[in-house]
């Protein structure tokens, strides 16, 4: 039986009951998700083998976004984030897209690029052609480094060479194109770049310097499209206002920075939950936003012939399921199990879809009611906890400070003291 991403009333349960409902919805055993429990996640001993000088752990809440249909498949999506309203907003946006088929994606392939920097070439353009003539030799040398990758259909398959003018003079830059399959690919391409650099230096008659992948993964693009129902959004005026807000972000880098941050709220949360490299993905996305020389919105919103809102997003996503924290971190393993993805393409499709959903939710809030109304209502629970409210007291304190329109820690403390005094009488 496939996953059912519709779980009405999920928020009304406690965390343990939610986890059981999510496991049932995803058609996995509850034990498969133990890595998401506070007592079943990453241990200090495991962490000590992952990075240097380990002294402790930091816990980030993991929520589950519901209602997503992606390429015809329902997905329950783990999101690791400290920011209130992100998970709820993405879930609500996905609900508005379900009636129009959900999210449809395309993927350009699992291609990563390593760069080898050649310095001090006497004849840079002649060096460029000499390196291109050695293409087959360089590819063979690169592929000797990772026979396992080659055996599963991946490996180095092309090179390109540029002459780059810099303030330090002309440099020859070799790009090694590698199909990394279901890995993020950094280790594979870096190893290949290191291996072929000495031969490149011989051919060029000079020396190489940097030999490393680029996080501008523009040969690994994911595109996603969804139609959001006009009535559920709030009517024709809201649709028109979202289109106008999108046009603002397309034209102005100041607005685009915050617009894209909303996209990354969704993207980063899924990337982090699955143990992938958030910094690499963020660098790639922001570089893509500036690919034409000006920083622009990554997404586009338009009104279709039926008056509904059509949304599209294109982002480079270097994510994988092989190696790194994805395999070493128990919570990441549980998140992947919950998602039910088996390829990097499927994971990238999920990540991009959540980014678009989160973007739509933020724009709708801005266009319809202002961003603070929904956000601060959820934030009130964090304020109540900060003020010292227990689990049983948080709801009452949060409701009161929202009603008072004073969502501040000092007011929450006063409300908490009043409630406790009343309870002790």
Image (cartoon, rainbow, N blue to C red):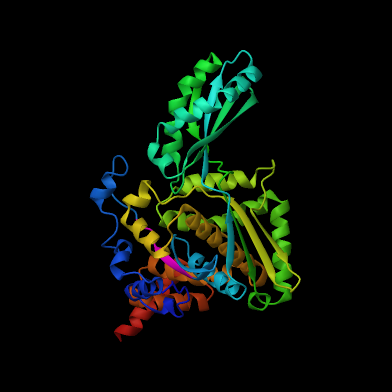
The percent coordinates of residue 181 (x first, y second) are 46, 46
The percent coordinates of residue 224 (x first, y second) are 60, 59
Depth check, front residue: 384 or 414: 384
Asked whether residue 56 is in view, the answer is: yes
Q: Is residue 136 above or below residue 373?
A: above
Quadrant of the drawing holding the C terminus: bottom left
Depth check, front residue: 375 or 72: 72
Q: Residue 58 sits in which quadrant? A: bottom left
Q: Is residue 32 above or below residue 126?
A: below
Please identify the dominant SS of the magenta region: strand
Asked whether residue 55 is in view, the answer is: no
Q: How many numbered discs sit on the rendered protein? A: 0
Q: Residue furthest left?
A: 45
Q: Residue furthest bottom?
A: 425
Q: Is residue 106 left or right of residue 138?
A: right
Q: Residue at x 51, y 58 (%)?
A: 351
- Tell whether position 64 is magenta: yes
Q: Residue at x 47, y 52 (%)?
A: 344
Extent of the magenta region: 59-66
Q: Residue furthest right?
A: 305
Q: Residue at x 50, y 18 (%)?
A: 201
Q: Residue at x 31, y 56 (%)?
A: 330
Quadrant of the drawing holding the N terminus: bottom left
The percent coordinates of residue 199 (x first, y second) are 48, 20
Q: Residue 192 sits in which quadrant? A: top left
The percent coordinates of residue 115 (x first, y second) are 53, 31
Depth check, front residue: 209 or 219: 219
- Tell whether position 183 is magenta: no
Q: Is residue 189 above or below residue 198?
A: below
């Amino acid at each position: 039986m496939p996953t059912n991403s519709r779980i009405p009333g999920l928020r009304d349960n406690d965390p343990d009951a939610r986890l059981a409902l999510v496991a049932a919805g995803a058609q996995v055993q509850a034990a498969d998700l133990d890595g998401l429990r506070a007592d079943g996640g990453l241990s200090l001993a495991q962490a000590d083998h992952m990075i240097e000088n380990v002294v402790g752990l930091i816990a980030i809440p993991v929520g589950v976004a519901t209602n997503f249909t992606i390429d015809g498949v329902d997905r329950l999506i783990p999101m690791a984030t400290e920011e209130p309203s992100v998970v709820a907003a993405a879930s609500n946006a996905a609900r508005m897209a379900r009636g129009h088929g959900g999210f449809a994606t395309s993927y350009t392939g699992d291609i990563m690029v390593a760069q080898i920097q050649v310095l001090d070439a006497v004849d840079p353009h002649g060096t460029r052609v000499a390196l291109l003539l050695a293409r087959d030799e360089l590819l063979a040398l690169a592929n000797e480094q990772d026979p396992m990758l080659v055996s599963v259909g991946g490996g180095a398959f092309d090179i390109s060479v540029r002459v780059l003018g810099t303030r330090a003079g002309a440099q020859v830059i070799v790009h090694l194109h590698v199909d990394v399959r279901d890995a993020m690919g950094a280790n594979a391409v870096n190893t290949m770049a290191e291996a072929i650099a000495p031969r490149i230096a011989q051919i060029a008659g000079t020396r190489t310097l940097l030999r490393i992948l680029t996080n501008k993964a523009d040969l690994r693009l994911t595109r996603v499209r969804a139609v959001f129902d006009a009535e559920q959004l709030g009517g024709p005026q809201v649709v028109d206002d979202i289109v106008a807000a999108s046009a603002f972000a397309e034209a102005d880098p100041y607005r685009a920075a915050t617009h894209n941050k909303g996209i990354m709220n969704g993207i980063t949360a899924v990337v982090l939950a699955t143990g992938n490299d958030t910094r690499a993905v963020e660098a790639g996305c922001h570089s893509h936003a500036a690919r034409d020389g000006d920083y622009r919105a990554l997404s586009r919103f338009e009104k279709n012939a039926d008056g509904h809102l059509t949304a599209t997003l294109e982002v480079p996503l270097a994510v994988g399921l092989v190696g790194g924290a994805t395999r070493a971190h128990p919570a990441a393993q549980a998140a992947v199990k919950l998602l039910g993805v088996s390829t990097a393409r499927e994971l990238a499709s999920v990540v991009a879809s959540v980014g678009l959903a989160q973007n739509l939710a933020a724009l709708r809030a801005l266009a319809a009611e202002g961003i603070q109304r929904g956000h601060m209502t959820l934030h009130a629970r964090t304020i109540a906890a900060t003020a010292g409210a227990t689990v049983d007291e948080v709801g009452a304190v949060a409701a009161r400070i929202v009603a008072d329109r004073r969502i501040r820690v000092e007011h929450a403390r006063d409300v908490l003291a009043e409630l406790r005094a009343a309870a002790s009488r």
